[in-house]
Image: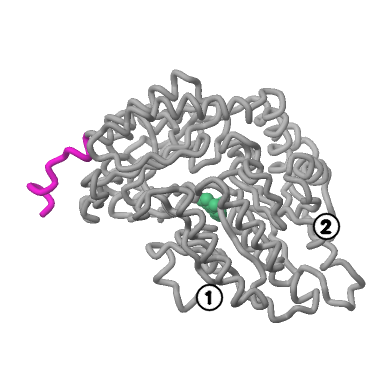
Amino acid sequence: ILKRSGGRWKLNPQQLLEKSKKYMWLPFTQMSDYERDPLIIESGEGVVVKDIYGKEYLDGNSSLWLNVHGHRKAEIDEAIRKQLESIAHSTLLGAANVPSVLLAERLINIAPEGLTRVFYSDSGATAVEIAVKMAYQYWQNKGRSEKTKFVTLSNGYHGDTVGTMSVGSIDLYHKVYTSLLFDALVVPFPAVYRHPSGDAQTVCNESLQSLRELFEKRHSEIAGLTLEPLIQGAGGMNTMPRGYLKGVESLCREFDILLIADEVATGFGRTGKMFAVEHEGVRPDLMTVAKGLTGGYLPVAATLATEQVYDAFYGEYEEMKTFFHGHSYTGNQLGCAAALANLDIFERERLVEQASDKAKLLSELLHDLGELDHVGDIRQCGLICGIELVQDQKTKVPFPFKWRVGYRSTLKMRELGMLTRPLGDVIVFMPPLAATEEQLGEMVRILKEGIVWATTFQYGATTN
Ligand code: PMP
């Protein structure tokens, strides 16, 4: 197999596995787990990826929520090749380049009303880091230097850099770094599943009320509020009750606080609209995009800003309003060319509408899972799903942490031919937008089998 991939690697799979164990340190991975069950992907086609032994897997998480069309989309391959004929990269510091200009226009044309400027970067985290710095400096440039604090929602996730962890709020990932991070003001996420009322409207009202109380007390110190619109990703796939997002927007306007919508995961059709904020007609002051922007090909991200934000940075050099920020690969030509081709496909294949239809189908397919004994909650927003496994459906008591039920069920799914990731005992399911009806059905069948296997396993006998 390895010899076939261009003849460059004269290794057998075993040698490659040994090297990977010896030299690699993988993200969000306990390496002792990896050493027990190593996986190395060699190729992909459509929604299927193949490992170095030739075993095929459905890409149930779109390769960490990126590969909208699956793999090896001919037009994107071609766009990158064509771009290579002119130039692969030149810096954006003090200069623009052709595909980055064209992409900026395309992004503004599809973005929610009010966003008029595109600032490029190279990952979701850098895009959010930039939004946070922009919001902070915006108020400094406006002479409101007391507005320095950020508000975030409990269980929020915006990336793994120090600034984005500061506006994040997931103990498992962030607690160890506490003294390294700046303090953000955390308000409760409107989570319905374990709320005593179980009523979405009550939860929505309560959460908005606590945000109002915070703003009333401290608005003069608050620069911005960050949130993942409609559904939190890494924090457990938590969906917001309808109306919450709009309510937050109104409060931000009322108290003069910049609204930062992190659309890194939700953008590009995932929720059934191009951007999640569109579902409630929300107009953020800053919006971040990444993941699906290049269809999962190359690391391009962007922070979109309103003219009002942009204007606060505009002036003569001596005024010191400049935004001194920029990464080496910002606005990379190959990446921007891939993104342009990606957006062409969105338009031509009417992918957002398709995603919306597929979301309805998926919701029917997932319905059956709710009948399994240990499925506590199925949270879905378009083609973003989280399935929470619990020990007891009635009491919602979780499984013991050390049983690692979520992790085990995803290992089983892998054996059955689908790749997914757990977030604790929440199974993340984010199929490519291009998955067919048949493929979605097969993915849900594997989800079910993996869940049944892991939740009925006799843990007591082997793990206590
Ligand atoms: N924001 C959100 C909402 C995300 O889901 C993620 C990544 N999962 C990020 C930011 C960070 O993106 P990246 O991994 O590209 O840095």
Q: Position of residue 184 (x, y in %)?
A: 54, 72
Please name the residue that numbered disc 2 is placed on: 307
Q: Position of residue 98 (x, y in %)?
A: 83, 43
- Residue placed most toward the observer, 154 or 39: 154
> What is the secondary structure assignment of the residue under circle 1?
loop
Mark 2 or mark 1: whose residue is earlier in sequence: 1
Tell me the distance, in whole angstroms, between the alpha carbons under discs 2 and 1.
28 Å
- Residue placed most toward the observer, 238 or 33: 238
**Ligand 1 within 8 Å of the CB at mark 2:** no
Name the image quarter holding residue 313: bottom right
Q: Residue visible at 45% across and 30% down?
A: 49
Q: Is residue 431 above or below residue 348?
A: below
> What is the secondary structure assignment of the residue under circle 2?
helix
Q: Which mark is residue 306?
A: none
Residue 290 among those drawn in magenta: no
Q: Main secondary structure of the magenta part?
A: helix
Q: Residue visible at 68% across and 28% down?
A: 345
Quadrant of the image for the C terminus?
bottom left
Instruction: Give the extent of the magenta segment.
Output: 453-464
Q: Residue visible at 44% across and 66% down?
A: 174
Q: Position of residue 152 (x, y in %)?
A: 54, 64
Amino acid at pointer 2: Glu
Q: Is residue 139 visible?
A: yes
Extreme-right residue of the structure: 316
Q: Would residue 145 appear left or right of 355 to someone viewing this image?
A: right
Amino acid at pointer 1: Asp
Please name the residue that numbered disc 1 is placed on: 183
